[in-house]
Amino acid sequence: MLEKPNFYSVIIGTELLNGRRIDAHFAFLNQQLLSRGWEQKASFVINDDTNLMENIFNLIKNDPNSVMFCFGGIGATPDDYTRVVAGKVFTSGAMEFHEEAKNRILNQFGSEAYPHRINMAYLPINAKLLKNVINNVAGFYLEDRFFFTPGFPSMSQAMVIEALDKLYPKSNLKKYRLVMTIETSENDLIDTMKKIPSHIELSSLPKIIGDKRKVVISLAGYDKDEVEKYFQLFIDFCEKNEKEFILKDISL
């Protein structure tokens, strides 16, 4: 388990992108991560393009603290590329028939495992398995941080919970967050924003309510004193420039 993981999700989603399906993966994963004190760094929905998949996997692999959940493309049809692309990126192309994965398929389907279903047991070397509660065809993971699950939410959601419970159950790190709404334009706050160090999470949400411009400012970080120190800069701005503010998010 990485101490400070950066979570990514990749949805192999041609049918999401062409409007034939509605995504059910992102919200579920996000809810599971947030309930454990984690949050995502990025999420990608991409089509079944092997070059694009390889590029996204490499981008995530190059982050030494990355943890990825990939949904879809591990079936037995000709457009299921995920296993092979995962092998190319994460195990230099080395693949093998995973004996336990084979046994699970054979136990579930018997002779009907051949000639196609059995290929779902052809995985990158050193893969570990995730339980499929629907049909026993396993998902898999590599290096305890790259997880590959089916595109069916009924299968993948149980695998997400299994993976997180086992390897990333709960964060001991808690972000401290301060929020305020200022009656001003976002442009007026830019100079103050530039003073916030990059490791502190800063968000700025402009709103127009009636004829008044307002900005919701949020700062978050793991060091309470530091967050309070930089949050004070916005309070100082308001007091100096006689801007009305309230210490809450008016958008909630």
Image (spheres, helix red, strand yellow):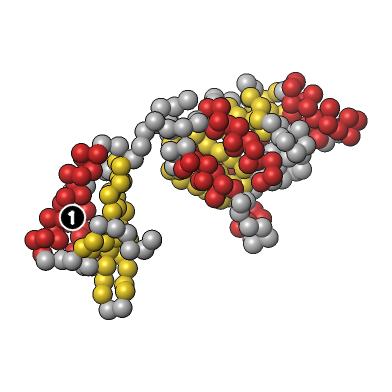
**Which of the pair 167/180 is nearer the observer?**
180
**Which of the pair 125/148 is nearer the observer?**
148
Who's the residue at 74% across and 22% down the image? 100
Who's the residue at 59% across and 37% down the image? 160
Residue 54: give x, y in percent of width and height. 56, 39
Residue 79 location, quadrant: top right
Residue 85 location, quadrant: top right
Residue 227 appears in the picture as rendered: yes
The residue singled out by tag 1 in the image is: 234
Q: In which quarter of the image is the C terminus?
A: bottom left
Residue 186 placement, left or right of 6: left
Residue 22 location, quadrant: bottom right
Residue 224: give x, y in percent of width and height. 24, 39
Q: How crowded is mark 1: few (under 14 residues within 10 Å), some or many (20 or more)?
A: some
View extreme (left): residue? 240
Who's the residue at 76% across and 33% down the image? 136
**Which of the pair 251/205 is nearer the observer?**
251
Give the number of callouts: 1
Residue 239 placement, left or right of 169: left
> Is label 1 in a helix, a strand or a loop?
helix
Q: Would you place residue 218 above or below residue 37 in this image?
A: below
Residue 82 appears in the picture as rendered: no
Who's the residue at 20% across and 39% down the image? 225
Amino acid of disc 1: Phe
Residue 245: give x, y in percent of width and height. 21, 63
